[in-house]
Image (tube, rainbow, N blue to C red):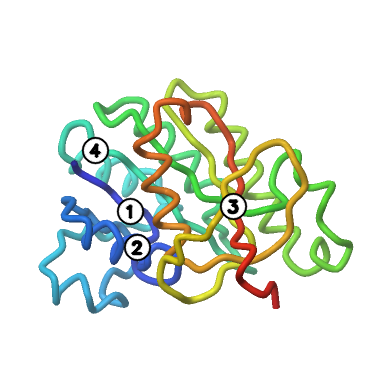
Amino acid sequence: MNIAIWGASTGLGAAMVDYFYAQGMNVIAIARNPNKNTKLTEHNITFICCDATDKQQVEAAVSALPDNTFNISTMGSFRSDTPVDYIGHRYLTNALEQSTSQHLLLITSLGCGDSWQYLSDRAKAGFGSAVREKSLAEAWLQSSNLNYTILRPGGLKDGEPTQLGELSQHKEVHGAITRGEVARLSHELLLRNDANGQIFQCIDPSIAPY
């Protein structure tokens, strides 16, 4: 299976690359600065340089993917003058609609969409702007023709898969989760037949939230 990881240079995207590479899948890493992830060269992983705020670069990256590639996007930006969260995913969604790769798993965060009501005032003040951008990305994807799934993880922490993360829907949850466990749960959603068009959230109750 071909897996394209968008936002693959650092953080959650880098953890996704590690996980899916370990599963023996053909990983294509896409990032503005892929050189930040030294494991790409170490493991001879194919990578594509792409600034997702540039429509033409996104279209070029999508056109370079093998047919029927499954896309996972972890792209995000915090307090950037040109945040990628909405516009990058708008360009990505539109480009994928014109390609053979019709599957996109979008990773956003707790607080997006209808879970905004559960964010504390402190959280809204601290990173509410990014959450609103991600909510717009969710809405754009939901109105597309793609086969999509949206995953909203809790607070991200460094760490390997714990096997203890919990997927849920339609309820209030708070908590944290390791990046490795988000990757494992993403794989689980990829294999499920009932995940298309669905929104999930995930936390690991064994991980302290702070």
* Residue assigned mark 2: 8
Dot 2: element: loop
Which label is found at residue 5? 1
Q: Which mark is residue 202?
A: 3
Give yes or no for contact between labels 2 and 3 (Cβ–Cβ under 8 Å).
no
Left or right placement of residue 45 versus residue 202 in this view: left
Disc 1 and disc 2 in contact, CB within 8 angstroms: yes
Disc 4: CA contacts within 10 A as few (<14), some (14-19) or many (>=20): many
Residue type at mark 3 is Cys
Relative to the observer, which residue lies in front, 80 or 180?
180
Give the residue at x 59% y 52%.
Answer: 202
Give the structural element (helix, strand or loop) at label 4: loop
Disc 2 versus disc 3: distance between alpha carbons? 20 Å
Q: Residue at x 69, y 47 (%)?
A: 112
Q: Quadrant of the N terminus?
A: top left
Q: Earlier in the sequence, mark 2 or mark 3?
A: 2
Which of the two labelled residues, at mark 1 and mark 4, occupies the earlier sequence position?
A: 1
- What is the three-letter code of the residue carrying label 4? Thr
